[in-house]
Amino acid sequence: MKKNIVFMGTPEFSAFILEELSKFHNVSLVLTQTDKEVGRKKILTPSPVKEIALKLNLELAQPKSLRNNEEIRNLISNKKPDFIIVAAYGKILPKEILDIAPCINTHASLLPYYRGASPIQSAILNGDIVSGVTLMNMDIGLDTGDILYQQELNIKDLNSPQVFDKMSKLSAKMLLEFLENPNYFQPIKQDDSKATHTKIIKKQDGLIELNNAKEIYQKYLAFYDWPNIFLENGLKLNELELNECESDNKEGLIKEIGKNYLILTCKKGSLKVYKLQDAGKKSLDANVYLNGKRLKQGDSIV
C-alpha cells in the first residue's frame, strides 16, 4: 500500500533514496537545504536532492531554518504524511516537526556507534571491516532514537564514495521494506553506554605525517573525495595502496620505482603511490612526477 511521505535530505546519498521511494510511494513534499556557493567562482548550486525533486516535478521547500518556522510546520502538517523520511538532511529537526508524524531517519552506521556528521569516514578511519545502515525513530537528540532496523555492510578496502554509494542503495532498500510493513519493525532502545560520536570533517584533517602506512591508507580511503590527504609541503598523494605495514624505515624515501608507481617509506610500513600532485598543480602519474623533479630511488620526496 502506498504511503504518503514527506522527504527531507540534501546530498547525493539522499537523492538516490528519494528517487527510489518516489517509484513506490507518494512523495507529497521534499525539503532540502538552500542552494550553496560552490568552488572558487562561488557558483550558486542546488543540492542533489533538489535536482531530483525538480526532475520528478515534486513540491519542494528550502527553508533557511526549521526552528520556530510556522510556515514550514504548517506546510508539512497540511500534507498529512504517514511518515517523514529523513536522509542526511543536515540539520537537527525541532520537536515541532517531530510531532507532526513519525520521523524515520536512515543513518550510515550501526548505531549507537558513530553518531553524528561523519559516520562513513569515521568507520573507514578506524579500519572497520563491517559497518552498516540503521533506520531509527527520530527524537530530539543527535542520532539517539530507537532502532527499527539494521543491516550490515562489508566496507573493507572501500573508499568513502564507494561506501556512500553502497549505503545509499542499502538505505533505499531498507526504507522500502519498512514502508511495506511498518508494524513489523519494533523499536529497540539504543545502549547509550556504547555510543561513539563523530565530528564534522575539516580541510586540515587531510594533513598527514609519514609515520604509519596503515593509518595513512585508511585516511586516504576515508578522505578520498575531500579533503584528500596531503603533506605539510602541500604534496597530495592522490592514488595509492598499502604496500606493507611491518617494516621500520626512515620516512619519506623513494624505496623503489616501478613501471607506474613508487614505493614511499613511512616510519612503519610503506605505500605504493600511483599519482601525486604538488599544491596548485595538476595530478601526475608517479613516473612523470619523478622525472619532472629528477628524483631517483633513495631520494626523499619531503
Image (cartoon, grey):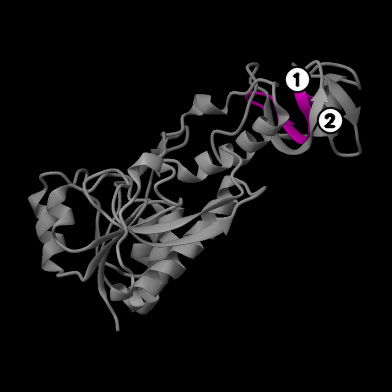
How packed is label 2: few (under 14 Cα within 10 Å), some, or many (20 or more)?
Answer: many
Residue 113 lies, in percent from the top left, at 44, 45
Residue drawn at the location 72% of the way across and 29% of the way down: 213
How packed is label 1: few (under 14 Cα within 10 Å), some, or many (20 or more)?
Answer: some
Magenta-colored span: 265-281
Front residue of 103/74: it is 103
* 277 in the magenta segment: yes
Which residue is tagged 2?
263
Residue 61 is tagged as none
Main SS class of the magenta portion in the image = strand
Image quarter of the N terminus: bottom left
In this rendering, would 153 be left or right of 250? left
Residue 267 is tagged as 1
Q: What amino acid type should be assigned to the residue bearing mark 2?
A: Ile
In this rendering, would 97 be left or right of 90? left
Quadrant location of residue 20? bottom left
Q: Is residue 70 above or below residue 184?
A: above
Give the secondary structure at mark 1: loop
The residue mark sitting in front, 2 or 1, is 1
Residue drawn at the location 49% of the way across and 64% of the way down: 170
* Mark-to-mark CA distance, 2 and 1: 13 Å
Residue drawn at the location 30% of the way across and 73% of the way down: 182
